[in-house]
Image: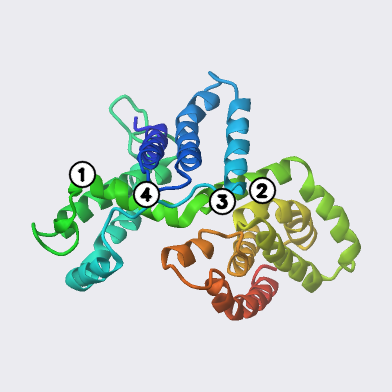
Amino acid sequence: MIKVEWFYWLCGLFFVVIALQVLNDRSNPKRLGSAAYWGILGVSFGYGTFVVNKQAPSWLLGIAVIGLAVLAGSGFPGKGAERTTTPAERVHLADRFGNKLFLPALVIPVVAALFGAWLANVKLGDGSLLLQSGSATIIGLGVASILALIVGMTLLRPQTGAVGWGKNPMQSPAIPMHEGRRLLEHIGWTAILPQMLATLGLLFNASGVGKAVGRVTDHLVPKGSLIAAVALYCIGMAVFTIIMGNAFAAFPVMTAAVGWPLLVQQFDGTPAVVFAIGMLAGFCGTLCTPMAANFNLVPAALLQMKDQYGPIKAQIPTAVPLLGCNIVLMYFFAF
């Protein structure tokens, strides 16, 4: 059986290697704190397996998370000198390879879909599943990423002496690590913000925030008003997503407060339609918040935009009318 932990360990190993690279980079004025940040994150991936198996205490992971938050609040991780291609060289390579650059990226969704739709039910000779139950998509994403790396290195490797990597003393085995480090240093601590926010949503729901919000909405929604309940659910999903930065974090809170008790139980809404459109309403909030770092702050950092809030400003004119459309769609199609 292929286990999902193997890919978590691989991610952890990647971050540990990044930490060692940063530690040896004398050009980085924040190298010690930055190395500590990536090192703690990397070790946490491996340690988490023992916590899940109840072989190690979970409170150490809690301390690690607090440590990451303290380091991020103190301005870590920082940037060192880039040891990969220059911006001009990257432009030259983009012109040279053209649309071939998209092939490694296209490998990822295709392979991940095959794992999730087909290999998830494949069994071995002893009757056990080939892939760990409930983790087929994540395993597929891990395998797809490795295959995409192989395709990229095979297809796009420049000839000796060419502009770019050919003139760079770091040859192909080191290129992915150094490029990965360059991207991580541009993104910074926001690289793990989505995971933190998703966990926050679970904590909110477990602590009873959804029930508390439900008691408040009882006083806001007029009795028997379907359109008011629909609007409250959709707008609430968008607002909580703006606060949390993740629609998946907002979903359990607003569904426990409004979606299930009002729209499904009281108004007999179709659950699949209510919750699917509710998630789309949450994504409208994703377009409007810096908390959704992977959608908004990360692209601005990767593209080195002058205005870090540029993506949000461009997306708000689409997000607001789209939220209205979701309210209308839910009202007419879910009941």
Q: Is residue 227 above or below residue 137?
A: below
The image quadrant that residue 25 belongs to is top left
Judging by the rendered image, the residue that carries numbered circle 3 is: 193
Mark 4: give few (<14), some (14-19) or many (20+) Cα within 10 Å: many
Judging by the rendered image, the residue that carries numbered circle 4 is: 181
Q: Compare residues 110 and 317 and report the one nearer the observer.
A: 317
**Mark toward the start of the polypeptide (1 vs 3):** 1
Q: What's the distance in space between the residues labelled 1 and 3, CA to CA? A: 29 Å
Q: Secondary structure at mark 4?
A: helix
Q: Is residue 244 visible?
A: yes
Q: Give percent across and percent down for residue 174.
A: 24, 45
Judging by the rendered image, the residue that carries numbered circle 1 is: 173
**Mark toward the start of the polypeptide (3 vs 4):** 4
**Mark toward the start of the polypeptide (1 vs 2):** 1
Q: What's the distance in space between the residues labelled 4 and 2, CA to CA? A: 29 Å
> Which callout, 1 or 3, points to the residue nearer the camera?
1
Q: Amino acid under label 4?
A: Arg
Q: Amino acid under label 3?
A: Leu
> Which callout, 3 or 2, points to the residue nearer the camera?
3
Q: What's the distance in space between the residues labelled 3 and 2, CA to CA? A: 12 Å
Q: Compare residues 334 and 285 and report the one nearer the observer.
A: 285
Q: Secondary structure at mark 3?
A: helix
Judging by the rendered image, the residue that carries numbered circle 2 is: 201
Q: Give percent across and percent down for residue 76.
A: 53, 47
Q: Secondary structure at mark 2?
A: helix
Q: Amino acid under label 2?
A: Gly
